[in-house]
Image (spheres, grey):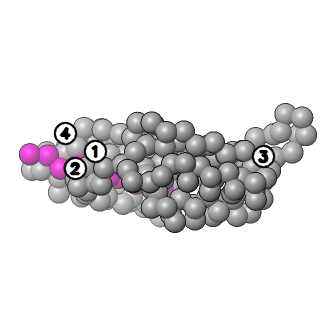
Amino acid sequence: MTTTLVLTVIGEDRPGLFNAIAEKTTEFGANWLDTRLVSLEGKFAGIVLLSVPQVREDALVDALHSLRSNRLSLVLERRIDAAALTPARGLRLELVSHDRPGIVREIAGLLAGNKISIEELETDFVSGSFSGENLFRARARLRAPWGLDVVVLRDMIENLANELMADISLDEGVTN
């Protein structure tokens, strides 16, 4: 039997940081299932999905916790059984707008109001090709209830796009 763990890591970015985690997981026979890592402004953040034999789970958790310091924070949680998740359809949302505070809040509010989960979100600033102004760009992978009327959602998104003076697109059929 195996246990699936979700490990989140935040700390000062430095060489060897992630190697220390990889060494511990290998030492206890854990298998890496999925990973997202990023370094932003000198901070390292990562989330890792691990599978570990149940007989080694406690030892692995203790070993990973031993890596904690004032420069590194780790949180480990058992993953919810994927079969228990409500069936859903995958959507992809993309947005480009002149930068201003509140864009993420507006989008997140619309999605939450429609019981849509954000599975993955990536945002950044880009320079406008003609104006040179900073533009805010977001790309999200979403999990929406099967019963959701996508036509109605698309209308709500178009209305929000008009309010934000943004270009927003919504695509169906994205694999989750």
Crowd band around label 4 with a 10 angstrom C-alpha radius: few (<14), some (14–19), many (20+) = some
Residue 169 - label: none
Q: Is residue 120 left or right of residue 25?
A: right
What residue is pinned by disc 2? 83
Report how far apart the C-alphas of labels 1 and 2 lie in the structure: 17 Å
The residue tagged with tag 3: helix, strand or loop?
A: strand
Crowd band around label 1 with a 10 angstrom C-alpha radius: few (<14), some (14–19), many (20+) = many
Q: Quadrant of the C terminus?
A: top left
Residue farthest top in this picture: 129
Are the residues flagged by discs 1 and 3 in contact, CB closer than 8 Å?
no
* Mark closer to the observer (4, 3): 3
* Mark closer to the observer (1, 2): 2
Near-viewer residue (4 or 131):
131
What residue is pinned by disc 1? 50
At which x and y percent is residue 64? 30, 53
The residue tagged with tag 2: helix, strand or loop?
A: helix
The main secondary structure of the magenta stretch is: strand
Are the residues flagged by discs 1 and 2 in contact, CB closer than 8 Å?
no
Tag 3: residue type? Leu
What residue is pinned by disc 4? 29
Residue found 19% across the figure and 45% down from its top: 52
Q: Which residues are magenta?
A: 1-10
Residue 171 seen by the camera: yes
Residue 135 - label: 3
